[in-house]
Image (cartoon, rainbow, N blue to C red):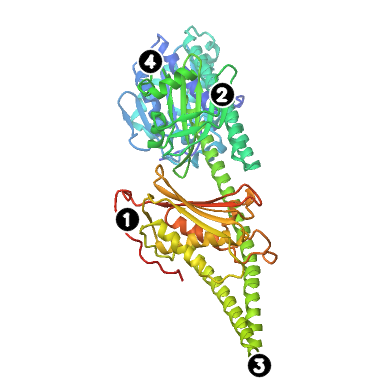
Amino acid sequence: MSISTSVLSDLLESLPYLRPQLYFKASLTALSHAMEDQVLAATLDQPLIIASFQRERFYRQEAHRYKRLSQRSNQIYVLSAPETDFTNSSEYYEKVAFQPDDPLSQEWHLVVIADNYATCLVCRESLGSIAKNQQVPDWLPSLDTDTGRRFEGIWTSERGVSIKAAQLLLDRIVVYRPDLVSKVEKARQRFGIGDSKAYVSSVISEYACDIDTDPFVQRLVTYLQASQYKLHKAYRSIAAQARKERLVNSISTAIRRSLDPHQVLQIAAQELGQHLGASRCLIYRAQAADTQATIEHEFLIPGVVSIAGQSWELNSNPLFQEVVDHGEGVCVTDSLNDSRVTNSVTLSLIVKKFAVRSWLIEPVLFQGRLLGIVELHYCSLPPHQWQQGELDLVEAIATHIGSALIQAEAYANLEELNKQLEALDRTRSNLIAITGHELRTPLSTIQVCLESLATEPDMPLELQQVMLNTALADSERMRKLVQDFLTLSNLESGRVEWHPESLSLQECVDLALSRIRTRPTVEKPPQITAHIAENLPLVRADGDWLVEVLAKLVDNSCKFTPSQGQINISADYNSDRMVVEVTVIDTGRGIEPNRLEIVFDRFYQEEGALRRTAGGTGLGLAICRQIVNGWGGKIWAESSGKDQGSQFHFTIPIVQGSQEEKRPKVKKLGNRK
């Protein structure tokens, strides 16, 4: 059976002068333990002790104390709502299991009555605290005992109130444990519970207490000190968390305000070093495979040697390798006693040179990819004892730095893409202008020549031949234009099949020059000479494409070199790079220094597309670059400036051991169509 009335309500109804007060659970715990300690410290025997717990889980936390109390009295009653194995029993003391729907499940009682003193604690948990506690899952017991829970009730050492509270609880006990009627009756008779005369006598004599109250006071003082310590610790934790949040917010703000990684990293080094009181804070970029890194950003306190701008060895740094292997930070409390430092020559030199006593290395990661390193150095004594909060903070800052670097990298990529789009747009415009001009001009000429031949049957044979030659020349010009477009398209799309072979450079040069000399020209070409050393090793390339590069470079020089100028082809062997370097030098109009790289761009024209004096599409040098890159070589231009001539260089890999072998004749190379 269960009882629907509340012990606290019955007590307040019986003694109307009582006024309940508000208590927190921490306070009730302190009072309960103080009352129990008073019993343990007293020399008198056999007090009456009644304790009521809301749940069995709360009882289990105090069961060991009541086992000790049972050595002082055989009149101990413990009530609780059972959850697992709490049942009615009489082992060390009397256990009374009440129904979970009994109002006792919301109350907390402790009554102690001895011959010369009495105290009682009768409280009920507030409705708001109960509702909050019911939302907590049963598998989180730590939250059930939250010290912030609130209770309202009575705590007093007034004997009359204690006797009345004992009466109400004993009545509840005999309902659940009828077998204890006789034992309960002995307690009633001994302490006058339920006897009105005894109650009056207790009120008169309640101040005649001769027991030692020091244990009670000491217990309360201990709890007060413990509470103050916890409060102080909580304040320190809140302050540290606030400082951490301010630091993270300042770095986050810097990331939002600027896409410049240099500025963000410098702010991060400054803020982190100051916040943690480090002697030195370093932030630098590094990847897992790097052997060295340059210290880019640094925070220093006065009197500490700077490392900014210096190279930091990584491949011989065991701490860096540990970071790479495990993907997490490492810390050294005392560098003089850490085997990782003392067993490494590199780290020992760093410690000695820069006075590093305590060391932290934290990786800057993004999706498992190493982007950089954050280092903290402490150079003073005693060695710095790393706290978990510090390590967590540095890790959080490193995460923000990783996001900043990726954000800056993405922005840089976006800018590069925008530049490429702008270049493509210019290419499109140039393509339209150049193809329109290059196609329209020869087509117009061909049309005029053919119309003249068709409408003038009496035209002299000499003039007819001139018309035919002009039409054929312009049709060849159009064919070359279309061929250059197709060639560059195939090269850029990777549709070209390379056929590398061992070649004699001299034969390739001769073939390229013969191709140029057989072309019909309107103006006299400049003088072309070739000086190829006889002892050059064989080169390895696709022969047809090598002849194409030579022909186009010479043809390009012819366009910008007057007929009285000179063009020279030379080649040298570079033994260090195992390549042959070919150079085409002309005495033409030259190239301005800021255009030496862009001359290899598609459709580049020194003059406007429609105002240039030299013909062509601007694809020749772009084709040369694609071909040379195809065999793994390099191509570049040099010039002292306008009207100072130009030099075009490209490299060809040699055939390994070709200097000792007999050179085979180059096979007959056909024109690339």
Q: Residue at x 62, y 41 (%)?
A: 260
Which is more N-terminal, label 3 or label 2?
Answer: 2
Q: Disc 3 or disc 4, which is closer to the eye?
A: 3
Label 4 belongs to which residue? 46
Front residue of this view, candidates 48 and 357: 357
Residue 622, which numbered label? none
Q: Which residue is mark 1?
A: 663
- Cα gap from disc 1 to disc 3, whole angstroms: 60 Å
Place of residue 55 in the rendered image (x, y in percent of width and height, measured from the top left): 42, 34
Tell me the mark number nearer the camera, choosing from 1 and 2: 1
Extreme-bottom residue of the structure:
457
Q: Are marks 4 and 2 in contact (CB under 8 Å)?
A: no
Question: Can you give x and y, in whole percent of width and height, for residue 530 in the image?
Answer: 48, 55
Q: Is residue 499 above or below residue 286?
A: below
Which kind of residue does numbered mark 1 sit on?
A: Arg
Q: CA distance from mark 2 to mark 3?
A: 111 Å
Give the number of the mark in front: 2 or 3. Answer: 3
Judge from the rendering whether residue 440 lies leftward or rightward of residue 663; answer left or right. Answer: right
Q: Which residue is mark 2?
A: 236
Judged from the image, the secondary structure of the residue bearing numbered disc 1 is loop
Mark 4 and mark 3 in contact (Cβ < 8 Å)?
A: no
Element on which disc 4 rests: loop
Q: Which residue is mark 3?
A: 458
The residue located at (56%, 35%) in the rendering is 126
**CA gap, disc 4 and disc 2:** 46 Å
